[in-house]
Amino acid sequence: MDIKRGMRRELPFHLMVWPGLLAVLIFSYVPMAGIVIAFEKFIPSKGIFASKWIGWDNFRFLFEQPDFAQIIRNTVVIAVAKIIAGLIASIGFALLLNELGRAFVKRAIQTLVYLPHFLSWIILGGILIDILSPSTGVVSWAFGLIGIDVPFFLGSSSWFPFTLVLSDVWKEFGFGAIVYLAALTSIDPTHYEAAVIDGANRWRQTWHVTLPGIAPIVVLMVTLSLGNVLNAGFDQVFILLNPSVMDTGDIIDTWVYRMGLVNAQYGLATAVGLFKSVISTVLIVSSFMLASKFANYRVF
């Protein structure tokens, strides 16, 4: 009787969940049947079931490509650099903002640094192209005032990865700091009082109280970000990429776009996507295991 009463009481909540589950099923799980294209010489006019089955040939062709290793390297380097730089910038900004006493100033600064997160890379890409232009950009003008030749940030293979990382940090560090600002509010104020009594200055309080207080959140965010090691940001790279920086700026997602949509090699592009998904799944599972071990975070 109690079970029936409980089911009747919880029925509205189950009905609220079902539309979301149905949407996930339709748009996330049903399309996974298209994975079979990775093992076919897919021809759109014939469809999935009539296209020729070629087994692992797409994967063999993929790994035989001379530039594929470089693309993997570019993806990992850019993604890891974004994770590390974003983590440092977000924590540093949260610590500095936490030291401000005036609430009005704090809210104004938060609004300014959060704003880029809500702008698409189509808008920000155009802004960066104008700002970093070696002939008419404001950066070139500023470098010229001090007599320094401005690097071609978007046209130099050596500078392009740094430009991607720094522009991504500029866009996301303010929004990423929200988690650390919330973590700072959970630190017991009596710890700071004890530190002051012991003669600790602001730097010592930050080092011995603040950073240890948010360490579990930092460990959690780092471990969870491991699943994004192969996601270097398609939209950003696609907007800013150009032929002169392909050797250091081309990533898996842009390569898949060219192979699948531009060159119509759908089987090869699907094989690359499946390869990336398998690696990402392994990394995500590993990250949750690490989060459970070091930060006591569990999904189930």
Image (cartoon, rainbow, N blue to C red):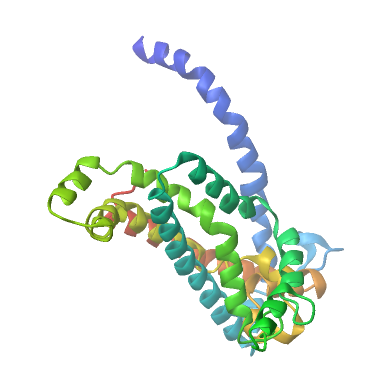
Furthest residue in direction left, as rendered = 198
Residue 299 seen in this snapshot: no
Q: Name the side, left or right, on which 26 lies relative to 280.
A: right
- Image coords of residue 298 (percent x, y): 34, 47
Instruction: Please identify the quarter of the rendering in which residue 221 is found.
Output: bottom left
Number of marks in the rendered image? 0
Seen at 82% across and 68% down, the residue is: 43
Seen at 44% across and 17% down, the residue is: 7
Rendered view: 120 above or below 63: above
Instruction: Please identify the quarter of the rendering in which residue 267 is found.
Output: bottom right
- Image coords of residue 178 (percent x, y): 47, 48
Q: Quadrant of the N terminus?
A: top left
Q: Nearer the viewer, residue 5 or 300?
A: 300
Seen at 36% across and 46% down, the residue is: 183
- Image coords of residue 69 (percent x, y): 57, 85
Q: Name the side, left or right, on which 261 lies relative to 27.
A: right
Residue 177 seen in this snapshot: yes
Rendered view: 79 above or below 49: below
Q: Nearer the viewer, residue 194 or 219?
A: 194
Rendered view: 191 above or below 54: above
Q: Name the side, left or right, on which 168 lies relative to 154.
A: left
